[in-house]
Image (tube, rainbow, N blue to C red):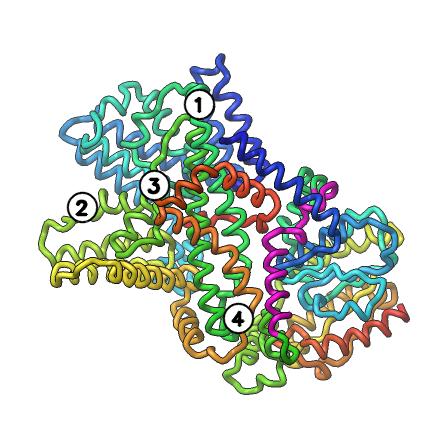
């Protein structure tokens, strides 16, 4: 029984690998975490020298409209920090010309398990050789994606409402429709305010900036230009210690006369879904601004 | 060290090689002890001392029950059980004690909050209690057969029993009377490879493909994010969480059973298709069997069981389940969970004692739906320790009918929960033509499971029951 079972597994795997080779465009993800892994794997396995600019950040920078930023790779990860992106960047043989580093979530530590699972030797080389082992080629996910597309096509009707798009992608309703005090937006903003109101621990802050300085130095030694940028957040958070102390620490560790920054637009000009994440329209608007500023750096 | 990590696989292979090497045949038990201590100390080396402390308590108390002063047998046994519980309470429940009775800024409270939680303490403590009690009662074996006269030999056997790595950190809670008589030389030729293979493949599939993928969707059963999800999405996520917790825990148990079998040791099944249960009593005979049987044998029956009248029976049920709930975690939400199950058992017993209910297909289906729904809602207390958030979740389920459904989340929850449904369904279809057809092609089934483990595993996550 065991031999037959292993043989069946082997045959299925060979057939599936051939199918993926024939259809290299087949790709799907099922949730944010898998999207992170797929993004990281694509970056790591496609080590060509065509990449000019890379963005490293958190879920805030994930919302940038990358269609409007050709030649850039967004190595921002939902639920993770800039250190995860920086760690992955270091493994790249051909470094990019510029790296844009998000300033907002600098206090979040690296998820060592994320990089460890990405670069664990046996799976790393196995996935490099066999794309059928990569996270965007999982058969159940591809099947699920196909079923959802089929259902979508068979129900031809009006285009998805913004609320339906948000629901499908797991986002709460945008700020504009969530003004009342008991709304989910207000609850989430209150949670963020409580977090931002705390003074960061000075020792921890210093340790984070020391780590960031080391990454930046190593990148610069490889000829990479580092540019810092801050994603706009809700006006009520902008002036709180969680934001101001971080800005001051950046000024101290990376003075503006030696390092490049994309100037932060006023927070009051942008709407968010939960206090920190820009909604679709606002993200597009900020991306437009980012693109113009990028050209000058 | 996770079961689904390369380092663990390496440890198992090296241990297997040493274990069955003929020149090391006399050292099989020490080889397993060494591997188990490496396994346990991998992430928390200092906390190995707690395991060794617990083992020491059991070595000494069980030895003195048998070879100590006969007038002090009971005292030795009581002390053994009390010290086991003392260690468990200190390391596991100090933070709960601190949160309940002290202010956050209080120095005593701060100290109690800082006490680390050794992984697996709930499991190996209960195992130790079973050893002391079994040796004292002599119910299953003659104590001197199991407790060797040589203190050193006895110490080695107890260390092995408690630290054996397949069941060390997340069960099954192996009882002394099941395990100790098995300790002895094992031969490579006696390995039941097919049974091991089936257990391991099913276990790894449930854990890596079902549970590890479902967790990415049930992650959103978190306050306040669930408040903006539609009723159907919330129901799907709750259903998914029920399947996830089963797949995670049953998967782990199957892996543990398969691994133990590789070394010649047989553990009892820990899950027997629990979601087909049509009564709460049946559910607790199918879910986490090693815990429920432990609670029955070492708590419920000593409290009087059902021998002291109806009211006392209901009280004993509630008390046993209250403590069983608290065993799961140092938070009052777990006690509430246990109490809820105790109440369900008590009410069911009352109805059975008071009314004559004719069992037929309709009552069985209704019973099954009731039990599954109750159990699933109760799992919310595991996911949302704040009871207020549980209420909010239920309110959102009732109120959010008009919100748009999250189709991808619902679709993937259904897809990944399907194996759990099929697993239970195949058991229900046992003996039918479909079941016989599947059995003939079981190599194809296991081959497919192996293939999916290779290409469709979720991101690695700790087993849910590690936190207990």
Count of numbered tags: 4
Q: Which residue is mark 4?
A: B225
Q: Which residue is mark 2?
A: B301
> Residue B105 location in percent, x, y?
45, 64
- Circle number at residue B30: 1
**What segment is highlighted magenta in the picture?**
A127-155
Q: Nearer the viewer, residue B368 or A203?
A: B368
In primary-sequence order, the first of circles 4 and 3 is: 3
Chain holding disc 2: B
Badge nearest the viewer, 1 or 2: 2
| B171 left or right, relative to A126 | left
Badge nearest the viewer, 4 or 3: 4
Q: Which residue is mark 3?
A: B125
Q: Quadrant of residue A197?
A: bottom right
Q: Label 2 vs label 4: CA separation?
A: 44 Å
In primary-sequence order, the first of circles 1 and 3 is: 1
Reply yes or no: does residue A250 show up in magenta.
Answer: no
> Residue B47 location in percent, x, y?
46, 40
In primary-sequence order, the first of circles 3 and 2 is: 3
Reply yes or no: does residue A136 show up in magenta.
Answer: yes
Number of other residues with Cα within 10 Å of mark 4, as a class: few under 14, some 14 to 19, many 20 or more: some
Disc 4, disc 3: CB below 8 Å? no
Disc 1, disc 4: CB below 8 Å? no
Judged from the image, the secondary structure of the residue bearing numbered disc 1 is helix
Judged from the image, the secondary structure of the residue bearing numbered disc 4 is helix
Q: Label 1 vs label 2: CA separation?
A: 36 Å
> Are the residues under badges 1 and 2 in a single subunit?
yes
């Amino acid at each position: 029984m065991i031999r037959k079972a292993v043989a069946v597994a082997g045959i299925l795997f060979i057939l599936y690998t051939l199918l993926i080779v024939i259809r290299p465009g087949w790709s799907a993800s099922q949730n944010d975490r898998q999207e992170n892994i797929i993004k990281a794997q694509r970056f790591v396995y496609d080590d060509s020298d065509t990449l000019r600019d890379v963005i490293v950040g958190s879920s805030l920078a994930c919302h940038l409209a990358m269609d409007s930023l050709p030649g850039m790779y967004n190595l921002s990860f939902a639920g993770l920090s800039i250190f995860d992106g920086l760690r992955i960047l270091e493994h790249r043989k051909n470094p990019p010309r510029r790296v844009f580093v998000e300033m907002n979530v600098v206090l979040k530590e690296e998820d060592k398990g994320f990089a460890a699972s990405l670069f664990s030797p046996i799976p790393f080389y196995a996935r490099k050789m066999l794309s059928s082992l990569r996270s965007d080629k999982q058969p159940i996910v591809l099947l699920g994606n196909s079923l959802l597309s089929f259902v979508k096509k068979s129900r031809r009707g009006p285009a998805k409402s913004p609320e339906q798009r948000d629901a499908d992608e797991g986002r709460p309703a945008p700020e504009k429709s969530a003004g009342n005090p008991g709304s989910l937006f207000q609850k989430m903003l209150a949670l963020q305010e409580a977090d931002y109101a705390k003074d960061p621990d000075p020792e921890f802050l210093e340790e984070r900036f020391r780590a960031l300085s080391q990454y930046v130095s190593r990148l610069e030694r490889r000829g990479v230009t580092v540019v810092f940028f801050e994603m706009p957040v809700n006006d009520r958070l902008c002036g709180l210690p969680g934001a101001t102390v971080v800005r001051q620490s950046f000024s101290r560790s990376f003075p503006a006369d030696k390092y490049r920054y994309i100037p932060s637009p006023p927070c009051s000009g942008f709407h968010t879904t939960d206090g920190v994440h820009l909604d679709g329209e606002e993200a597009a608007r900020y991306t437009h601004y980012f693109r113009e500023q990028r050209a000058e750096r | 060290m996770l079961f689904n990590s390369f380092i663990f696989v390496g440890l198992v292979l090296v241990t297997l090689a040493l274990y069955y090497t003929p020149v090391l045949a006399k050292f099989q038990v020490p080889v397993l002890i060494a591997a188990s201590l490496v396994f346990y100390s991998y992430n928390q080396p200092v906390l190995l001392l707690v395991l060794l402390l617990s083992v020491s308590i059991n070595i000494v108390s069980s030895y003195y029950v048998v070879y100590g002063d006969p007038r002090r047998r009971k005292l030795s046994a009581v002390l053994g059980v009390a010290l086991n519980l003392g260690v468990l309470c200190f390391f596991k429940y100090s933070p709960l004690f601190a949160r309940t009775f002290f202010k956050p800024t209080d120095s005593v409270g701060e100290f109690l909050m800082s006490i680390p939680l050794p992984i697996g303490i709930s499991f190996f403590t209960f195992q130790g209690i079973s050893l002391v009690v079994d040796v004292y009662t002599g119910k299953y074996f003659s104590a001197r057969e199991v407790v060797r006269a040589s203190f050193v030999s006895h110490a080695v056997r107890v260390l092995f029993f408690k630290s054996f790595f397949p069941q060390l950190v997340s069960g099954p809670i192996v009882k002394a009377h099941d395990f100790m008589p098995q300790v002895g030389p094992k031969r490579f030729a006696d390995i039941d490879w097919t049974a091991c293979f089936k257990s391991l493949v099913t276990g790894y599939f449930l854990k890596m493909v079902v549970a590890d993928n479902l967790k990415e969707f049930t992650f959103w059963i978190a306050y306040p994010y669930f408040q903006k999800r539609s009723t159907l999405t919330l129901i799907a996520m709750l259903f998914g969480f029920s399947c996830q917790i089963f797949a995670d825990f049953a998967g782990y148990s199957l892996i543990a059973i398969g691994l133990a079998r590789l070394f010649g040791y047989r553990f009892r099944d820990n899950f027997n298709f629990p979601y087909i249960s049509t009564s709460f009593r049946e559910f607790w005979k199918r879910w986490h069997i090693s815990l429920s049987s432990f609670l029955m044998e070492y708590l419920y029956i000593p409290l009087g069981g059902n021998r002291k009248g109806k009211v006392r029976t209901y009280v004993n049920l509630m008390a046993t389940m209250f403590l069983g709930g608290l065993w799961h975690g140092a938070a009052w939400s777990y006690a509430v969970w246990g109490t809820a199950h105790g109440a369900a058992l008590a009410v069911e017993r009352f109805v059975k004692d008071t009314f004559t209910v004719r069992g037929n297909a309709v009552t069985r289906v209704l019973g099954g739906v009731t039990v599954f729904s109750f159990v699933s809602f109760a799992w919310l207390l595991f996911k949302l320790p704040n009871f207020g958030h549980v209420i909010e979740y239920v309110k959102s389920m009732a109120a959010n009918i008009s919100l748009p459904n999250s189709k991808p989340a619902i679709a993937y929850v259904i897809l990944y929960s399907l194996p759990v449904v099929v697993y239970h369904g195949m058991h229900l279809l046992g003996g039918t033509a479909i079941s016989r057809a599947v059995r003939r092609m079981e190599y194809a089934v296991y081959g497919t499971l192996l293939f999916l483990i290779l290409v469709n595993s979720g991101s690695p996550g700790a087993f849910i029951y590690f936190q207990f």
